Amino acid sequence: MFESLSDKLKRTLKNLRGEGVLTKEHVDAALREIRLALLEADVNYKVAKDFIASVKEKAEGQQVWQELKPSEQVVKIVFDELVELLGGQSSRLVFTKQTPNVVMIVGLQGSGKTTSTGKIARWLAQNQERKPLLLSVDVYRPAAREQLRVIAKATGQQIFEQSETNDPLTLVRAGFKHAQQTGFDTLLIDTAGRLHIDEELMDELVRIKNETHPVEILFVADAMTGQDAVRSAEEFHRRVGITGVVLTKMDGDARGGAALSIKQVTGQPVKFVGVGEKYDALEPFYPDRIAQRILGMGDVLSLIEEVQSKVDQDEAEEQLKKLQKNQFTLDDFRSQLRQVKKLGSFSKIMKMLPDQLLGGMGMPQLDDEQTKVMERELRRTESIIDSMTWQERTDHKILNANRRRRIARGSGTSVAEVNQLIKQYTEMRQMMRQLSESGLFGGGGGFGGGLKGKMMKRVAGMAGIPDLGGMGGNGDEPGLPALPAGPSRKKLKKKKKKRRR
């Protein structure tokens, strides 16, 4: 997602930071590069032009050249404008006290509309405590209603079906009445799609809209189609009046032109993005977090939320205490590997961390091939630890040559690989200890909900990210204050000496 745009913008802004004295010529050259990067990312021409004009106006209006770090001021302006371009604040689905609230899902055939309907229902049930009911009125596409039934079963959601009728309005009326009588507070209607926009499709959608008075009309678009998705969204909005957009296949779209153009062209925000085929691969769209990822600042807040939802908090707290006391064992290491696997691919996790923080740790971003190699190594690591006795997993110092040979045979690896694991483990313990001393894991609670802002500020401070004001807000939380500077190596050394004494 946004890989090509992100690489070009990071390179351009890095060159800007490398200038000893910043001049208007440097900024103009950087803006030309940014404009080219936006156009190559399939961003609408007018949107790219307006973006550059706005950045230039603000840069000149704020007299950034007089600042102590003018390059950081330019980065801040680019960040702010990117957030605005992506839609400003995050837009949640809006519900009323009416029962049921109707959400219409519209879009062209093949955009992932039916799958997205199931994903949204699952997300609403898990994150907004809604009780959704699914309804398919796609009576034209073969097995469309059967497809939604399969998805409903897989996501654990309820579906309303009436096989004896093929009239969309009759289905809508019956589904609405059933939801009202059985206590469902949300009715998600998966409407019929076409391979292209036509009068028949639009007239049917307008009739369903007039019948149900939906609180949300979500247009589902395939992000891979770029500006075609934007044009389709614009036409649907003109004819039906959409309230938001769901972009599917964002994990396969390296350019991101649709996401960057849709709000400016249609006036309606992106509300969700599909980032995979699994039913939990749906994320709310946070413009500020996306802007951070594009500029290489990571997305620590989303990473922490991901950890909170998928990692055993009690176990994480226990491991945190062991880390702080330097009691982290190979058994704990294995448990941590298993927890990490729940978060998804390694590349996804790495992309949520700031580039500068990874660089400081000597850990570059990974491409797909490197990710596969890394995940293969992790499986091998887990296999080696599985071949150890409990005593060996809790005290690595007893692993002599004989024990290592036995472990290598049991795990189908070599003694050299076992030795390499032990070496990596001891180095990791040392790195974790340093992170703990720096305050990243301190503060009583680790990944606790109330510490999300503090955690992100600490990571950002260690990475040397400039103050971006509202960085990290999600529409419900206030912006963060200035980011503190990370601890210097000198201070870390002093702490080490004190502990040794």
Image (cartoon, rainbow, N blue to C red):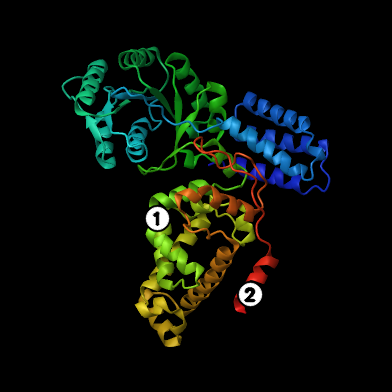
Q: Position of residue 234 (x, y in %)?
A: 50, 20
Residue at the disc numbered 2:
498
- How crowded is the residue under tag 1: few (<14 C-alpha within 10 Å), some, or many (20+)? many
Q: Residue at x 46, y 31 (%)?
A: 271
Question: Which disc number belongs to residue 311?
Answer: 1
State the SS at label 2: helix
Q: Is residue 384 above or below residue 45?
A: below
Question: Which disc number belongs to residue 216?
Answer: none
Asked if one can make out residue 356 in the rendered structure from this viewpoint, the answer is no
Q: Is residue 424 above or below residue 345?
A: below
Q: Which sits in the foreground, 390 or 419? A: 390
Q: Which sits in the foreground, 380 or 348? A: 348
Q: Is residue 371 above or below residue 252?
A: below
State the SS at label 1: loop
Q: Which sits in the foreground, 256 or 481? A: 481
Residue positioned most to the left: 164
Asked if one can make out residue 102 in the rendered structure from this viewpoint, the answer is yes
Q: Are marks 1 and 2 in contact (CB under 8 Å)?
A: no
Using the rendered view, name the quadrant where residue 24 is placed.
top right
Distance from label 1 to label 2 (Cα)? 34 Å
Dot 2 amino acid type = Lys
Give the mark, 1 or 2, whose residue is nearer the N terminus: 1
